[in-house]
Amino acid sequence: MSEDIAQDSSGFATRARIDTTKPHSARFWNYFVGGKDHYEVDREIGDQIKGIFPGLVDVAHTSRRFLGRAVRYLAGEQGIRQFLDVGTGLPTADNTHEVAQRVAPDSRIVYVDNDPIVLTHANALLTSTPEGRTAYLDADLYDPEAVLRAAAGTLDLSRPVALMILNTLGHVSDYGQARDLVRRLMAGLPPGSHLVVSDSTATSEGMIAASEAYNSSGAVPYHVRGVEEITGFFDGLELVEPGVVRVPEWRPDGDGSGAAAVDAYCGVGRKP
């Protein structure tokens, strides 16, 4: 990748925060899904992990396609017109706002991330149909109330919102804390809102080995969890069929996910 990511930042302080000497989860994932926004250090650990566990590439691609199916379901079948995407990562094709606004042009989407790399791409995210609205917040999952206050500048939090937390909760090392953060975010949203979660899971020796290799690389650690722990994020919500399943198995619609037995699970739950 060229150096223009660092140079396109809105300020010197943000540029200074970008560390290209260590792998970075958003750049690493961007490499796996075929994006362009990564450095040599990200490609090196990516290639190392491909050698340990090639299946992680399938996790990346099928998880991305799950995002599209979930958003199409929420916008098309449930009439959701507001999306709060926390930990959005680097933009590629078919971001949340693009999928939602193809179904419902008046959809409003707020992306949330506290990462300088993502911040430099904010202009790419800040696109919208004339009828809808898209915004980006430089905010932190660890402060849910601040996220909700800031999102209220774009979203009407008295109306249902889809809270999207995809491939992000593994960065919270303590499971109890991760569940509490999800609970606090959902507490600020009205009945009829939905939670969408997907994450890599400790369901094979290969995935566990890949996680250990990534975490020893100097990157911010990412913790893979058991399926029952992913299910626990939906406590108090009404799980949408088919429940918590491997990402290709959630309402497949011919998007190319296939039936790959990937080590990643997902679900969608409705707040009663």
Image (cartoon, grey):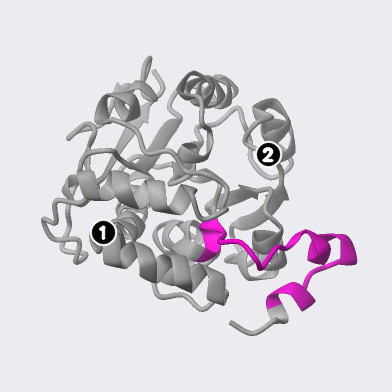
Is residue 190 rendered to the left or right of residue 225?
A: right
Comparing 174 with 169, the one in front is: 174
Comparing 205 with 263, the one in front is: 205
Is residue 116 rendered to the left or right of residue 262?
A: right
Queried whether the magenta region covers residue 187, the answer comes back as no
Q: Position of residue 53 (x, y in %)?
A: 26, 59
Q: What residue sits 30% from the left and 26% below the top?
A: 231
Answer few, some or many: residues within 10 Å of disc 1's Cα (few below 14, many 20 plus, some between 14 and 19).
some
Mark nearer the N terminus (1 vs 2): 1
Check disc 1 and give the amino acid type.
Phe
Q: Which residue is mark 2?
A: 140
Asked where in the image residue 86 lies, by quadrant, the reply is: top right
Residue 212 to residue 130: above or below: above
Queried whether the magenta region covers residue 18, the answer comes back as yes
Is residue 71 rendered to the left or right of residue 2?
A: left
- The answer to whether residue 185 is seen in the rendering is yes
Question: What separation in Å lies between label 1 and label 2 (alpha carbons)?
Answer: 31 Å
Check disc 2 and give the amino acid type.
Asp
Q: Position of residue 160 (x, y in %)?
A: 50, 32
Residue 9 to residue 199: above or below: below
Q: What residue sits 58% from the left and 21% below the top?
A: 184
Element under disc 1: loop
Answer few, some or many: residues within 10 Å of disc 2's Cα (few below 14, many 20 plus, some between 14 and 19).
some
Element under disc 2: loop
Is residue 237 rendered to the left or right of residue 20?
A: left
Start-end of magenta stretch: 5-27
- Nearest to the eye among marks 1 and 2: give it: 1
Q: Which residue is mark 1?
A: 53
- Could you tell me which quadrant the N terminus lies in? bottom right
Q: What residue sits 54% from the left and 21% below the top?
A: 177
